[in-house]
Image (tube, rainbow, N blue to C red):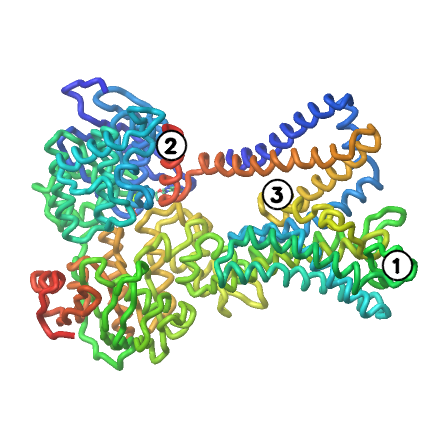
């Protein structure tokens, strides 16, 4: 019963979101039926579209799996954007520094560099929270801004392609990175590359970490009850740092995959975070929430979101609606899903008789709200 | 409520409630009349709280019928229950600490000047209620400033303010000091005299005998007996409840005491509010002895336990050593590695994680040991084997090892924590209120286990507000008052009266 509800609510949210989207399409003078058909065929309509969607989904899977880790430890990570950038930058630096290494060496190195870069960017707010009680929501958001500016600085001067200076065009981008760092394509003629496999493996790894290892056990313990964890001898502060570092490192890996799975095989900035990340740092959060903060469920949920993004882009081209519609659609779905994850929680806690010491309290609390 | 003078205030008939793997209530009948204190007595997991939650609309029964003043009702929610004059005092208070007493009481009720508030009217009614039932409370004081006993009174006022006629009190005395219990019983008597019906749950037979008019005994979800304090004394009640004879005082064979394992010298520490909670305290616990700490709660016992466990910092110059290892501010990992087992007072907060499964909580401390993990992965088969053994050995009543711990009954959670702590093979055992909320059969078992540890050479420090418990299991009893040890007496020569005097701050025995 309660399983059913927790599955049905996000689907209902998606339906409600589509109803809103239909209204907007009509207002723009387009047929909703055609619109949805365009979205669907753009997302899942052919092998090619399926693989584009998969490539779009890969960073969402990674960010989402990372978010699942931090949320399980009761740490909220809104810093995916910054962590993606940090991972991308470090992996780019590594690729620039060792362009001649053979692929079996260089490719793992740049991926690890992505993990490390994002991990460091995640560990900073983790340490601030653990040791200076700085709210991680604020610090992760701030660090997003810092990361963007740092990326712009790096790509405008130290890492800029020397050709850009020579020509005087000064486009903020690196030179073409070593082909030995490129993520190989899996199916000829499509965009499907190894990064998708890496993302899925990492999500499975996140699952194993959370539920099969002593480390994950500790993170979950800290997430549920820092007091009980502390009394049991679990290092609470260190666990908080670890959770954010792990979460950040998966986002950082996404950053590396964005660079080395890109067609240009280089890192470019248009000055904004979204210009590089495609907002994967935020959409990954939604994918994780949609997947119930479970790393494995994040995989299909990220795929659906990837489909929404590619589908909306397709819609824009086919129906000639404004580009902003793609972003709006995405926003609507996000809004419904995020609010529904609250609804879902509330509904399942109503259905599932919960703890002796919490259930009665929350029920009473909501009763009082209702009756006041 | 339609008043029908012949029918009892509450009749529950054939109430049955099933949970996955558990028959929590099996066709239970309960009748409560106005002007009576009706006690529910039963082992941990017998189904008392479940029955009360059904009455308060928190659970729906699978079968059965509830009548209020002769009228059949379906209690669909707590607000329905409140509307029909049922109040429930939860063990965990639901008060907003930053609001005043009056504001807390008014919360969730409709003001007479809606949508504006009417603080004067509320305050007046609160004062009226507190006066009528002797619940001395200032309506304008903020709740965080109140002691536990006072907060409970606020909860009672809340229920009376909502015009509750039938009040459910699920283990209300577990958190009260003996003095507070006496005052609490006076309040209950006052309510009884004014025609309220009271349902009382407690594992302390002394209290049950003192306050009850009627006693219904539950076992395994069924009513197994009905009696009154006049008919049954404490021993008979214990037998009715557990189904066998219970020894209220376990055997304590003489043991040679060894070297000091827990050494506390010149310990001073502050409370959370920054006041001095422990004031230059000295104490030694040797291998093979149980030292009991008696005292009215709030005299530094909680802080003492936390400092010894390594969880609370102490003032410069304080010495606390566990087998020679410094414990002050060292963290629980260090103290546990030094040989400490720690049963915290607040079991729900510090002792177990409600959302974790039974087996996860049983390996909460040792999950990273070689026994339970290898090459970075948890060894589930071994964890399962170990946990099954502990659950059997300590008779933790649970449908399975993967059951969420929060669904266990209160006493069974305490048993789970004790099983984990005692199984770790400690050389120093620190237990705060080890049998709070635990039924007498289980308390007997826990006492036996603590003494078995002592016989093996463990140094045990037991903090308790239950003097009977301390007299039964301790070799020496130290009384704490205002952060100091007032005196230490050998258990053989200790008396309730003598300890009571010291607890009130009157020095006796050997000064610390
Ligand atoms: N929400 C729930 N889900 C599953 N099982 C439950 C739930 N609540 C209670 N139980 C089970 O029902 C049985 C009765 O529990 P209950 O809390 O009523 O016991 P109790 O008599 O109050 O015990 P205690 O004296 O320890 O408080 C227990 O076996 C418990 O595990
Ligand atoms: Mg109970």
Left or right, A346 with respect to A13, comes to left
In the displayed structure image, the side of residue A140 where residue B360 appears, left or right = left
x then y, percent, for residue B23: 36, 39
Rendered-image quadrant of the C terminus of chain B: bottom left
Residue under circle 3?
Answer: A291
Circle on res. A367: 2
Any part of residue B380 in sight: no
Look at mark 1 in the image and give the residue it sits on.
A164
Asked if marks 3 and 2 touch (Cβ < 8 Å), the reply is no
- Callout 3 environment at 10 Å: few (<14), some (14 to 19), or many (20+)? many
Task: Judge left or right: residue A180 versus residue B294.
Answer: right
Secondary structure, mark 2, is: helix
What residue do we see at 27% from left, 25% from top?
B84
The correct choice, above or below, for A106 with respect to B127 in the image is below
Placement of B92 over or under B427, stated as above or below = above
Q: Are marks 1 and 2 on the same chain?
A: yes
- Neighbor class of circle 1 (other Cα within 10 Å; few <14, some 14-19, many 20+) is some
- Residue drawn where x is 16% and y is 53% of the image: B178
Left or right: residue B387 compared with residue B184 = right
SS at circle 3: loop
Q: Sequence-wise, which precedes: disc 1 or disc 2? A: 1
Residue A111 visible in this rendered orientation of the protein: yes
């Amino acid at each position: 019963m309660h399983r059913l509800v927790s599955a049905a609510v996000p689907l209902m949210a998606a339906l409600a979101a589509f109803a809103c989207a239909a209204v907007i399409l009509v207002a723009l003078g387009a047929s909703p039926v055609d619109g949805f058909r365009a979205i669907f065929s753009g997302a899942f309509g052919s092998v090619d579209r399926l693989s584009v969607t998969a490539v779009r989904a890969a960073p969402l899977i990674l960010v989402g799996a990372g978010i699942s880790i931090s949320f399980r430890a009761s740490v909220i990570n809104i810093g995916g954007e910054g962590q993606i950038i940090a991972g991308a930058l470090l992996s780019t630096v590594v690729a620039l520094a060792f362009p001649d290494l053979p692929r079996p060496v260089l490719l793992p190195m740049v991926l690890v560099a992505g993990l490390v870069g994002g991990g460091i960017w995640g560990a900073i707010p983790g340490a601030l929270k653990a040791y200076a009680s700085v709210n991680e929501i604020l610090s992760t958001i701030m660090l997003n801004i810092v990361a963007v500016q740092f990326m712009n600085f790096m790509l405008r001067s130290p890492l800029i392609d020397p050709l850009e200076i020579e020509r005087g065009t000064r486009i903020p981008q690196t030179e073409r990175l070593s082909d030995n760092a490129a993520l190989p394509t899996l199916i000829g003629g499509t965009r499907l590359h190894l990064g998708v496999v890496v993302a899925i493996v990492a999500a499975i790894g996140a699952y194993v970490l959370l539920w099969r290892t002593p480390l994950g056990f500790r993170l979950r313990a800290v997430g549920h009850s820092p007091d009980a964890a502390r009394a049991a001898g679990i290092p609470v502060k260190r666990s908080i740092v670890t959770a954010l570092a792990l979460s950040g490192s998966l986002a950082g890996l996404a950053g590396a995959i964005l660079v080395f799975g890109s067609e240009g095989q280089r890192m470019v900035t248009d000055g904004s975070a979204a210009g590089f990340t495609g907002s994967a740092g935020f959409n990954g959060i939604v994918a994780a929430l949609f997947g119930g903060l479970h790393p494995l469920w994040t995989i299909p949920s990220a795929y659906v979101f990837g489909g929404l993004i590619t589908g909306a882009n397709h819609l824009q081209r086919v129906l000639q609606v404004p580009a902003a519609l793609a972003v709006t659609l995405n926003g609507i779905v996000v809004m419904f899903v995020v609010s529904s994850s609250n609804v879902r929680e509330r509904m399942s806690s109503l259905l599932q008789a919960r703890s002796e010491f919490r259930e009665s309290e929350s029920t009473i609390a909501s009763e009082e709200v209702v009756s006041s | 409520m339609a008043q029908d003078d012949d029918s009892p205030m509450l009749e529950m008939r054939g109430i049955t409630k099933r949970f996955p793997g558990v028959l929590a209530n099996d066709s239970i009948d309960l009748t409560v009349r106005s002007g009576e204190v009706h006690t529910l007595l039963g082992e941990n997991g017998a189904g008392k709280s479940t029955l009360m939650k059904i009455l308060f609309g928190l659970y729906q029964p699978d079968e059965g019928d509830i009548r209020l003043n002769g009228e059949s009702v379906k209690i669909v929610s707590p607000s329905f229950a409140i509307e029909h004059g049922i109040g429930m005092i939860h063990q965990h208070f639901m008060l907003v600490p930053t609001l005043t007493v009056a504001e807390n009481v008014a919360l969730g009720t409709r003001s007479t000047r809606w949508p504006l508030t009417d603080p004067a009217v509320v305050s007046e009614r609160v004062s009226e209620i507190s006066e009528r039932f002797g619940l001395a409370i200032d309506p304008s004081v903020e709740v965080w400033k109140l002691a536990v006993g006072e907060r409970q009174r606020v909860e009672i006022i809340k229920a009376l303010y909502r015009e509750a006629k039938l009040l459910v009190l699920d283990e209300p005395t577990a958190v009260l000091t003996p003095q507070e219990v006496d005052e609490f019983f006076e309040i209950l008597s006052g309510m009884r005299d004014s025609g309220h019906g009271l349902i009382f749950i407690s594992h302390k037979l002394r209290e049950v005998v003192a306050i009850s008019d009627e006693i219904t005994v539950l076992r395994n979800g069924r009513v197994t007996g009905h009696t009154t304090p006049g008919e049954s004394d404490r021993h008979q009640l214990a037998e009715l409840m557990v189904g066998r004879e219970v020894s209220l005082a376990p055997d304590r064979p003489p043991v040679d005491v060894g070297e000091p394992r827990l050494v506390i010298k010149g310990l001073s520490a502050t409370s959370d509010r920054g006041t001095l909670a422990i004031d230059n305290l000295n104490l030694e616990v040797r291998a093979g002895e149980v030292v009991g700490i008696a005292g009215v709660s709030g005299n530094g016992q909680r802080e003492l336990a936390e400092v010894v466990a390594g969880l609370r910092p102490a003032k410069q110059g304080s010495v606390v050593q566990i087998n020679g290892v410094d414990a002050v501010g060292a963290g629980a990992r260090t103290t546990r590695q030094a040989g400490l087992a720690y049963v915290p007072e607040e079991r729900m907060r510090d002792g177990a994680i409600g959302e974790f499964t039974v087996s996860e909580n049983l390996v909460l401390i040792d999950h990273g040991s070689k026994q339970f993990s290898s090459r970075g992965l948890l060894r589930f088969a071994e964890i399962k084997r170990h946990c099954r053994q502990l659950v059997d050995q300590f008779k933790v009543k649970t449908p399975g090892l993967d059951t969420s711990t929060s669904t266990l009954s209160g006493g069974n959670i305490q048993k789970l924590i004790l099983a984990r702590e005692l199984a770790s093979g400690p050389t120093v055992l620190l237990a705060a209120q080890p049998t709070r909320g635990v039924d007498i059969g289980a308390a007997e078992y826990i006492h036996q286990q603590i003494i078995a540890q002592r016989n093996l050479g463990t140094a045990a420090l037991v903090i308790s507000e239950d003097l009977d418990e301390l007299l039964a299991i301790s070799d020496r009893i130290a009384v704490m008052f205002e952060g100091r040890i007032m005196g230490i007496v050998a258990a053989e020569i200790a008396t309730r009266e003598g300890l009571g005097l010291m607890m009130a701050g009157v020095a006796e025995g050997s000064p610390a």
